[in-house]
Amino acid sequence: MKYVKLVGIYEELEKTSKRLEKTHIISEFLKKTSADDLPVIVLMLQGKLFPNWDDNKIGVASRLILKAINTATGISSARIEKEWKKTGDLGIVAENLVKGKKQVTLVSHELSVKKVFENLRKLATLEGMGTVDKKMQLISELLTSANPVEAKYIVRNVLEELRVGVGEGSLRDAIVWAFFGDKVDLKFSENKIEVEREEYNKYVDSVQRAYDITNDFSSVALTAKKDGLKGLNAMGIRVFRPLKVMLALKVGDVKGGFERCGEKVDVEYKLDGFRIQAHKDEGEVRLFTRRLEDVTKQFPDVVEYVLNNVKGDSFIIDCEAAGFDPKSGRYLPFQKISQRIKRKYDIASMAKNFPVELNVFDIIYYNGKSMLKESFEKRRELIEKIVSGKKRKIVVVKNMITSKGAEIERFYKESLNEGNEGVMIKNLSAPYKPGARVNYMVKLKPTMETLDLVIVGAEWGEGKRAKWLSSFVLACIQEGKFLEIGKMGTGIKEKKEEGVSFEELTKLLRPLIIAEKGKSVEIKPKIVVEVDYEEIQKSPTYSSGFALRFPRLKGLRTDRRASEATDLDLVEDLYYGQKK
Ligand code: AMP
């Protein structure tokens, strides 16, 4: 397929903000796409080059793109930079500058989707000497052959920042419309659909389920096209491909826990660590965070605990890794051990100084069989059978099964005293639902809740802080959109020994700058931070409609994706909750 065809679709999608219209555009395009092209097209419609479970990253900073535009067009860096400041969008800069460059009209060979995709994927695999130059050449080679609009999207593809607003929901629905639309008599006109609702929902659920398990819309779309509903329903769990985890709702008190989870419930310590999905097959163990990032290398200690203390040829277990003080053995808050997640060197000494205990609380797959449909009670029984507990190494999370409120209250206090966040209450007969926030696994913790917010902007500092970003624009999320909720300048340290420093944040954020105007920069939403505050207020200043009073950085949430930031619903709940 010619790249220009895909670019046409990008342009159409960018023109409308209506979700159903976007879904329609994508579904018509998917219908016409051959099975050969489908996987790549589905990725590129999401502005991605790798599926979620794949850890490869392109890793190209804005500066490198400036250089590539310079090489491809011969236009001076100073002028490109000026255009960038003016428009605030490197894609548009590339479009405008390629337009102004006469020779482009003479370019003979047209770009194919495959060529663009392959060049961009190469960016992720380059390593070692001369990498930066090679990356620059790969991009400028594409820009040289591109027409102006193609140039705009090549840049956006490189930045993995498509800006055409295709969310997971629209893509899922588009797959249903494209491959099952005729089965449910789906008719779309004037931004409305008519459909046999019940049947339609069945297909939507099947596509969603397949996606939650595989984390890969490309293989979901291809299976829907080739093997239909049967194929989708047969898509199974694969060891070493992380699944989306099941998430919990919050309840305000013990009564709320019983209301959601039944008369007799399972209650567990809620540890303040980070989630680890541990996979084992053929004697090999791999670990994934809830963001589906492979952290096996960072946690050789945990790999060993799993290998030596969990029986079974193959399995996937769901766990919380909780840090503890190596001297006193007491649990520590997540922020104390969070640095281990991204650490690439001195792994052994990190494991010694910041040990973690793996608390197994669920099982998803065991010896070739999915456990998703089994009741929680059965799953818990199984983990108790296969995990041989070793305190401060690997244990089955501490629990009790009860129908008495007073017992839960006591257990809750005990858990808080141990340094934990609270308790989880779980319905004994419920299944495991990947990717869903369910009302049969709930959390109970003291009300003051920190927020996990995404940094979407910042300002360069003044005086001695001039080389650092110093004031950070925070956003929560709603249906894939980032909505601003405040600006944060406190809690960040001057020196790196004291915690998260201005220097560290600047280093993290600088490569993500997508636009710059005066002192303000716009930042690609990637970095999630945990934020404390005095109060939530209503505010017309920010797009969320709320503002945080005295927001303060508590730490980096390296285990969360931007899409997992606090959503607006929770902010609203907290706002109304604090009025109680
Ligand atoms: P929250 O992050 O506040 O939404 O709480 C849910 C998280 O608590 C899960 O994603 C787990 O990482 C963590 N957690 C800690 N202990 C448990 C437990 N016993 N069962 C389930 N999740 C737990």
Image (tube, rainbow, N blue to C red):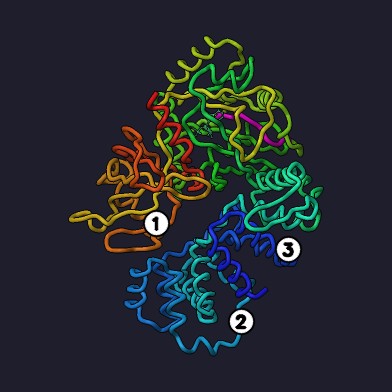
Q: What is the x, y in percent for residue 374? A: 73, 29
Residue drawn at (65%, 47%) of the image: 241
Local crowd size for mark 3, using a 10 Å CA cut-off: few (<14), some (14–19), many (≥20): some
Can residue 466 be seen at all in this image of the molecule?
yes
Mark closer to the chain start, 3 or 1: 3
Magenta stretch secondary structure, dominant: strand
Residue 224, position as x, y percentages in the image:
76, 54
Judging by the rendered image, the residue that carries numbered circle 3 is 31
Three-letter amino acid code of the residue under disc 1: Ile
| Magenta segment | 359-366
> Residue at point 46% right, 34% down?
355
Q: Is residue 455 left or right of residue 425?
A: left
Image quadrant holding the N terminus, namely: bottom right
Q: Are marks 3 and 2 in contact (CB under 8 Å)?
A: no
Q: Check mark 2 vs ligand 1: CB closer than 8 Å? yes or no.
A: no
Gap between marks 3 and 1 measured at Cα: 35 Å
Q: Secondary structure at mark 1?
A: strand
The extreme front residue here reads 190
Q: Quick one: which residue is furthest to the left in this view?
A: 463
Q: Which residue is mark 1?
A: 523
**Label 1 beta carbon within 8 A of ligand 1:** no
Kindly identify which residue carries mark 2.
110
Q: Could you say whether the residue bearing mark 3 is in a helix, strand or loop?
A: helix
Q: Looking at the picture, which amino acid does disc 3 mark? A: Lys
Q: Nearer the viewer, mark 3 or mark 2?
A: 3
